[in-house]
Image (cartoon, rainbow, N blue to C red):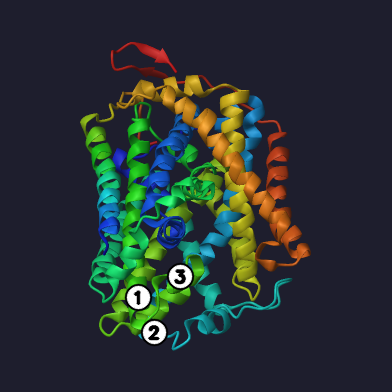
Amino acid sequence: MSGGALAMLIVAIVIVWGGLAMSVVTLMRHPDVRVAEDRPDL
Amino acid sequence: MQREREQWGTRAGFLLAAIGSAIGLGNIWRFPYVTYENGGGAFLVPYLIALLTAGIPFLILEYAIGHRFHGSPPLAFRRLHRRAEALGWWQVGICFVIAAYYAVIVAWALRYTGFSIGQDWGDDPEAFLIGDFLQVGEPGWITSYVSGVLWPLIAVWAFVLVVLALGVRRGIERANMIFIPLLVVLFGILVVRALFLDGAELGLDALFSPDWSAITDGGVWVAAYGQIFFSLSVGFGIMVTYASHLHRRSDLTGSALVAGFANSSFEILAGIGVFATLGFMAASSGVAVGEVAQSGIGLAFIAFPQIISTLTSGAGLFGVLFFASLVIAGLTSLVSIVQVVISTVQDRTPLTRVPAVAIVGGAIALVSILLFPTAQGLHYLDVTDHFINQYGIALAALVIVIVVSWILRRLQPLQAHANLTSAVRLGAWWQVALGIITPVVLGWMMWDSLRQEFEQNYGDYSTEFLLVVGWGLAIGVIVVGVVLSLFRWRGADDFVPAEIETVGGEGRRS
């Protein structure tokens, strides 16, 4: 693989998969708060 | 008819269902080729900008509409504004049409999973696909049925209808909790195997080598925004429907970021797997990667069978992994598309879930089974897919952003609604993305597509055939949407937005 192709492969993985990891971590730090009116069994 | 809406059991369940809807056949067979054709590694720059300035903002818009107005697309849009109901029905019509032909591709992939074990396509996979398997005839009226496609198609529909009949939690959520991890594992094994094939580096080099001159080409930017729109399942009401089953304090923006990045992550993985495999094919044939690179049906059902037959070890397993991945990706998307129609019928009629699935899901299945496992099925699929994508999904998305942002001016309250429950707060950028960037790009895409349509008949089909199967269908869906919105809908307007507790504890009506 050329240097340019390898660099773009790494950049793509870092940004997209890194973006996914950061989004998941952010979401996990803010769990949904269920209120009494939420009735998931309906 | 108003009734309590079923809710997702867990946030992970909703996220996996949303991701399962977004990850479809296009991720595997469209993204790699679009990237290669539009500047390789350089394409990733407009692609990522499109993801952040149009894809994720539109995803948040659909989540906010579904969550705020608590209904399927026609009901949610009616609650947004009484005269916007037709937009929702238009989306339901689009889903009806797409479901009918999408199922048949899943059925092909199902058969090819079995064909892979013995490489039943022989030495000429193209002749096998067109002649032996699909038995393709001339475009026009149906001349014969193809039993080899009919039976797997019935199996696909039986599975989809059973999942939907089980409901949001026990059906859709549970199926995605199993299928999405399974898809990642199966496709991950395939990618690892592909990376160890001779010539894999040639394919990756062809895919990721950046041609920076492409950045200045407007067509490349249009391709990037088009890929994001078609890949994320936005514009045809799926995310409105899925978000309507969320509970009140769900994090909308965070969920959209996870779903959007997960979809793109899988696309990158698919690009690596597909082009590593194409590199092997090019190396073993002694040709350039560009000569073997293709997309869509040609990639999946002609190029990949050729490659599988060339493998000296583990050919059957490689084929099963590839086609099983297509089946899983297709099924989870198909379930989400049909759910839009089912949810709408439940909102609009007194029917409960199982009768709604049996009657309406059965009707879509019947149309699919009558039209597509035929000698003319491939032509119907090709033309329907082209016209419903361009003048269904993309046009509906364009009309929705114009109506919501410029005519009804509802972006501000929808932004406030998303911010009430989301950790990542939306700023002015969100309104700029949806009010300016998205309409400009979609408008340009529409103009460019229409220009090409009138320059040359799509696929060199006859004008008569395109008028009936292409334009007729795309315009017919709009007409049906408008007509259905004219019927009286008792109780639809008796809606009071839920009061949502803000983080500070003060109750606010969003």
Which badge, 3 or 1, is on the more N-terminal residue? 3
What amino acid is labelled 3 in the image? Leu
Discs 3, 1: same chain: yes
Q: Position of residue B279 (x, y in %)?
A: 34, 72
Q: Residue at x 48, y 35 (%)?
A: B62
Name the spot of residue B286 as percent of width and height, x first: 37, 82
Looking at the image, do the residues carrying marks 2 and 3 touch, with CB atoms under 8 Å apart?
no
Question: Would you say residue B277 is visible in this rendering?
Answer: yes
Instruction: Say whether residue B440 is left or right of residue B190.
Output: right
- Foreground of the two, B301 or B249: B301
Q: Which residue is mark 2?
A: B119
Find residue B507 and report its horizontal and vertical position in percent: 36, 12
**CB within 8 Å, label 1 to label 2:** yes
The residue beneath circle 1 is B319
Amino acid at circle 2: Gln
Q: Residue B398, percent across and down?
A: 59, 38
Q: CA distance from mark 1 to mark 2?
A: 8 Å
The foreground one among B438 and B164 is B438
Q: Mark on residue B299?
A: 3
Q: Which of the two residues, B272 or B479, is positioned nearer the viewer here?
A: B272
Q: Earlier in the sequence, mark 1 or mark 2?
A: 2
